[in-house]
Image: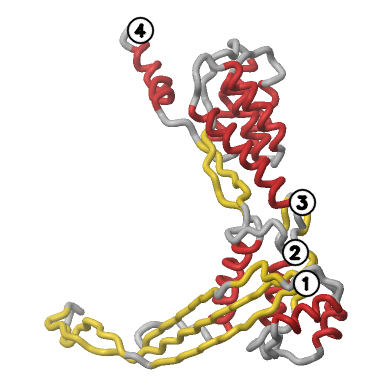
């Protein structure tokens, strides 16, 4: 039995030495080109070069889709009012002064205008292949050589140069040229059909609008948050068992299950920095930043010495709270 005992302890020792599991969440960051007075009630007017209005339609849909804490970040002015003010001409180039006049007539805080250029090219290059020039009766190759095959390559380049103008003062809140490219190629020896112009256009539009959203609005970036797995401060019994089951659920990438188990573990008496910290992670996952901060502070108070995960979490959540106040507040608008 004395020889078996160390073997039974081995998995526990390995688990203790293993790095703690992480839970994937997201944090909000400000617009890459931040303007505290950026208008959020916007009129989108026809874009130069967008002769059928399709890109403007995709742009409006993209703006409407931006939300923070379940609330839309931008609101668009009534399309009828904007159309009446701008006239029915699609693809027309508007000066900044004309754009401001249209925005004011539509009752908008800001007006979004700009230009779109699209360049589509199709070429028929040839590519080299190594092929079997002479085969034996069993299907083996006796002599290899080079051969060229015909191909079709399509490239689509787009440049979107938006300007978001504050109608009250005529100030440009955002202006930049965003470029994107999408390509497709297929050759005579492959069965894959080459993507057409419309598909390439859709891909480039998606790429450009993604960059545009990051430029003008707050957005979320992924964060890997480590959990704490020490059971110190949790008496033996059901509470500790629930805590450990939560750790195992987190290791299986089931944070929802882990949080349920840790909530149950918290009903039992304990003075555990790890449990309080992990509950803070759960609050953070749920978007309850003030609650997360409170749990992290409880964890810190129970520590005998500073812990990197707790220190990092406190800093992260405090910055997140400040950022949300910055990007969702109406101050200065």
Q: Position of residue 227 (x, y in %)?
A: 54, 31
Q: At x 52% / y 25%, what residue is drawn?
A: 229
Q: Position of residue 69 (x, y in %)?
A: 74, 49
- The residue singled out by tag 1 in the image is 167
Q: Disc 2 to disc 4, how far (Cα)?
A: 75 Å
Whether residue 252 can be seen here: no
Q: At x 75% / y 50%, what residue is drawn?
A: 329
- For the residue pair 304 and 323, the one nearer the viewer reads as 323
Q: Position of residue 169 (x, y in %)?
A: 76, 70
**Element under disc 1:** loop
- The residue singled out by tag 3 in the image is 331
- 10 Å crowding of disc 2: few (<14), some (14-19), many (20+): many
Between disc 1 and disc 2, the foreground one is: 1
The disc at residue 39 is 2
- For the residue pair 101 and 129, the one nearer the viewer reads as 101
- The residue singled out by tag 4 in the image is 1
């Amino acid at each position: 039995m004395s020889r078996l005992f160390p073997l039974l302890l081995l998995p526990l020792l390995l688990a203790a030495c293993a790095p703690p599991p992480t839970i994937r969440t997201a944090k909000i960051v400000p617009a890459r080109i931040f303007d505290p007075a950026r208008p959020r009630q916007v009129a989108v007017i026809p874009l130069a070069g967008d002769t059928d209005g399709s890109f403007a339609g995709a742009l409006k849909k993209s703006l409407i889709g931006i939300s923070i804490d379940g609330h839309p970040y931008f609101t668009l002015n009534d399309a009828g009012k904007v159309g009446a003010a701008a006239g029915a001409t699609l693809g027309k180039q508007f000066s900044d002064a004309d754009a401001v006049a249209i925005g004011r007539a539509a009752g908008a805080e800001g007006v979004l205008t700009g230009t779109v250029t699209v360049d589509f090219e199709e070429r028929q290059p040839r590519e080299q292949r190594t092929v079997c020039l002479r085969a034996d009766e069993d299907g083996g190759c006796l002599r290899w050589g080079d051969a060229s095959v015909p191909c079709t390559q399509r490239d689509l380049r787009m440049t979107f140069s938006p300007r978001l103008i504050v109608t009250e003062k005529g100030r440009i809140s955002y202006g930049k040229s965003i470029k994107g490219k999408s390509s497709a190629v297929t050759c005579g020896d492959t069965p894959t059909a080459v993507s057409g112009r419309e598909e390439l256009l859709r891909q480039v539009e998606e790429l450009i609008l993604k960059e545009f959203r990051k430029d003008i609005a707050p957005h979320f970036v992924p964060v890997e948050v480590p959990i704490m797995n020490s059971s110190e401060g949790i008496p033996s019994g059901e509470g500790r068992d629930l805590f450990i089951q939560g750790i195992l659920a987190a290791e299986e990438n089931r944070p929802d299950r882990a949080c349920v188990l840790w909530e149950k573990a918290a009903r039992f008496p304990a003075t555990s920095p790890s449990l309080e910290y992990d509950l803070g992670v759960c609050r953070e996952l749920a978007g309850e930043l003030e609650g997360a901060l409170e749990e992290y502070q409880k964890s810190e108070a129970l520590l005998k010495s500073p812990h990197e995960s707790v220190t990092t979490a406190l800093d992260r959540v405090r910055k997140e709270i400040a950022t949300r106040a910055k990007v969702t507040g109406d101050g200065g608008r």
